[in-house]
Structure formats: C-alpha cells, structure tokens
Image (cartoon, rainbow, N blue to C red):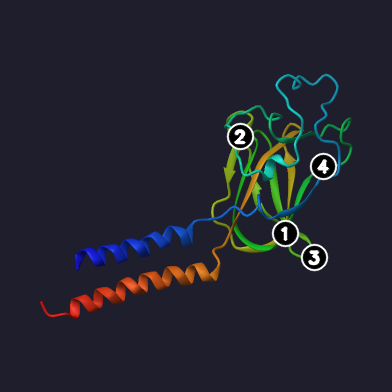
Amino acid sequence: MTRVRGGLAAAALALAPAAQAATNIIPAGFRVISWPGTAGVLRAGSPWGPGSTLSNPFAPVDGLFRPEMTQWNNGSFWWDQHPSVNPFELFWTVILDRPYTLNRLVVQADNNDSYIVEAWDGARWTVVFDVPEVDGFGLMTRDSGILPAFTTDRLRFRATGGDLYHALSELQAFAVPEPATWAMLIAGFGLVGGTLRRRRALPA
C-alpha cells in the first residue's frame, strides 16, 4: 500500500513542474519581424568592426542565448544609433502568430544600455519590462521575473539609453499556463488526496 501511495504521489508531483513550467512561445510562435532603419552598419571610425558579425534580425527568436559577455555585435541583432547611421530611432518588433497571455520576459542584450520591451494592446504600445543596464561586458541576460499578466500579439524592443551601440541577442516570452494544465495539476493532487483518505479508512 505504501508503494501505491508513493507512486500516486510521485505521479501527481510530476504534474506540478509540467503545470508550472513556463514555455517560451516565441521560436514557434512568430510571423513577422520588422525594424525601421539601418542595422549592422557602424559609424565612421568606430572601433567595433573587429569581432563583429552580420546583424541578424532573427537571432532574438532562435531560442538560444549567446555565452554571457559575448561582444555586443557578434551573433545578435545590432545597430548603431549614431545620427550618421540612423537619424531616426530604430526599434525591433516581433508579431506573434496569435495573441498570448504572458507574465515573464527574458532579454539578452548589450549590457551598458537600457531598453524597454513594449506590448501592443490593440490600441497602443505599453511598457511591460524596463530592461536596466547591468555590470559586465557585451551581451548579458536580464529576467523580468513574474509580471502582471498581459495579452498581446506583438512585442517591441527599444533602446532608451546608453552609448548608441545597441544589440538584442535573445527575447523570450513565457505564457501563463493554460487552464487545462492547471486542471490536470489539481486533478492529480485530488487523486492522491482521495486515495490516501480511502487507505486511512481501511481497517488495520
């Protein structure tokens, strides 16, 4: 009997991580990426040519983080916001395949810049994650933690400060668990609880 109880408990507990595990919806769930402006071009005299790679607008949606402290313009979507290259603000937008309800974002971007991630609510852009500058060098990861849930079908990434050399190498967006997943978790714990009550009610 102990073995049965243990097996049921293990099965139910196994459901907990599945129900709570966040899923990055972007790699399989995007339709369009856009950016108005010139990416992958450096101002005259910039020292950042050596070690750079082509700016890749799809790098942020490949589901892969670069090694921390990789040079900012290596393996990322990068741009120089200097007026000689981009006289107007450049920002990066991803349009998802459908609306998702999200509550966590993870960004890997150039460390010594500040950024924001905005969500489209159907009428306007709303800031959902202020991405701060961090210590280190080059590409560094920032995690929003759990956010108030919001529903959107597009996200926009913009620089708000720094040295005008900007880069985004990964943007991950995590969906709130579906109601069916929570129902599975609750049912699993209910099964364990009911079995234990029945076992206790049996005569010794």
Please name the residue that numbered disc 2 is placed on: 66
Above or below, 188 relative to 31: below
Select label 1 or label 3 by which is in front. 1
Q: Residue at x 55, y 67 (%)?
A: 178
Q: Residues within 10 Å of mark 1 (few under 14, many from 20)?
A: some
Please name the residue that numbered disc 4 is placed on: 90
Residue 88 point in image, percent of width and height: 88, 41
Q: Measure how far apart labels 1 and 3 are at the Cα level.
A: 18 Å
Select label 4 or label 1 by which is in front. 1
Tell me whether circle 1 and circle 2 mark residues in contact (CB < 8 Å).
no
* Residue 71, label in figure: none
| Amino acid on which the number 1 mark rests in the picture | Asp
Please name the residue that numbered disc 1 is placed on: 97
Q: Measure how far apart labels 4 and 2 are at the Cα level.
A: 22 Å
Tell me whether circle 4 and circle 2 mark residues in contact (CB < 8 Å).
no
Label 1 residue SS: strand
* Sequence-wise first label, 4 or 1: 4
| Amino acid on which the number 2 mark rests in the picture | Arg
* Sequence-wise first label, 1 or 2: 2
Label 3 residue SS: loop
Label 4 residue SS: loop
* Sequence-wise first label, 4 or 2: 2
* Residue 123, label in figure: 3
* Sequence-wise first label, 4 or 3: 4
Front residue (pair 76, 85): 76
Q: Residues within 10 Å of mark 2 (few under 14, many from 20)?
A: some
Q: Measure how far apart labels 4 and 1 are at the Cα level.
A: 23 Å
* Sequence-wise first label, 3 or 2: 2
